[in-house]
Amino acid sequence: MGLPGGHIDKGETPDESLHREVMEEAYVEGTCEQLGFIIVDHSNNAKWNDQSKYPKVGFQLFHTLQINKMHTFEAGFESCERILVDPTEISRLYNGWHHIYQEILDCALSSPNH
């Protein structure tokens, strides 16, 4: 199981990217709220090089999305299925769950829009 995510395309804002990614991967539309970000720094990563998929220093943005419209799931992009899960169950279902993810989830759940 994975969470919707991706990269910002050239000329795209973070919000535009989020809306595009959740539509491509989950076929939903909604209202988003940015929760924050973390800096991902590969400066001390011996496996990183100029041909790496990710930049040496990048950012991961985290949002919460209030779903306003669910479209028919077509699996036309990167996802083969869409499931909705209880947020309290996600740490059990997501392979590789990390305490940072839990902090982000807790922040999302405490959002007034949740």
Image (cartoon, grey):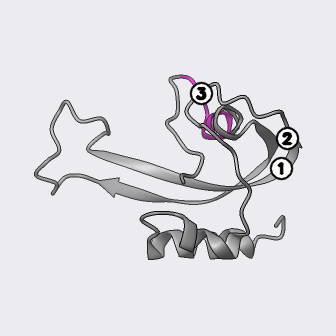
Q: At x 16% / y 54%, what residue is drawn?
A: 45
Point out the stretch of residues depicted in magenta. 11-18
Residue 82, magenta (yes or no): no
**Spatial distance from mark 1 to mark 2, Cα to Cα?**
7 Å
Indicate the quadrant where residue 23 lies: top right
> Which of the numbered marks, if any, corresponds to residue 67?
1
Ranked by sequence position, the earlier of labels 1 and 3 is 1
The local crowd at label 3, few if under 14, some if 14 to 19, many if 20 or more residues have their Cα within 10 Å, is few
Q: Nearer the viewer, residue 106 or 89?
A: 89
Q: At x 64% / y 76%, what residue is drawn?
A: 106
Q: Are marks 1 and 2 in contact (CB under 8 Å)?
A: yes
Q: Report x, y in % for residue 49.
A: 15, 38
Indicate the quadrant where residue 86 lies: bottom right
Amino acid at the residue labelled 3 = Phe
Relative to residue 46, is residue 78 drawn left or right? Answer: right
**Which residue was labeled with disc 2?**
70
Residue 12, magenta (yes or no): yes
Q: Nearer the viewer, residue 101 or 25?
A: 25
Q: Residue furthest right?
A: 68
Q: Quadrant of the N terminus?
A: bottom right
Relative to residue 111, is residue 99 drawn left or right? Answer: left
Q: Report x, y in % for residue 112.
A: 83, 70
Q: Quadrant of the C terminus?
A: bottom right
**Which residue was labeled with disc 3?**
77
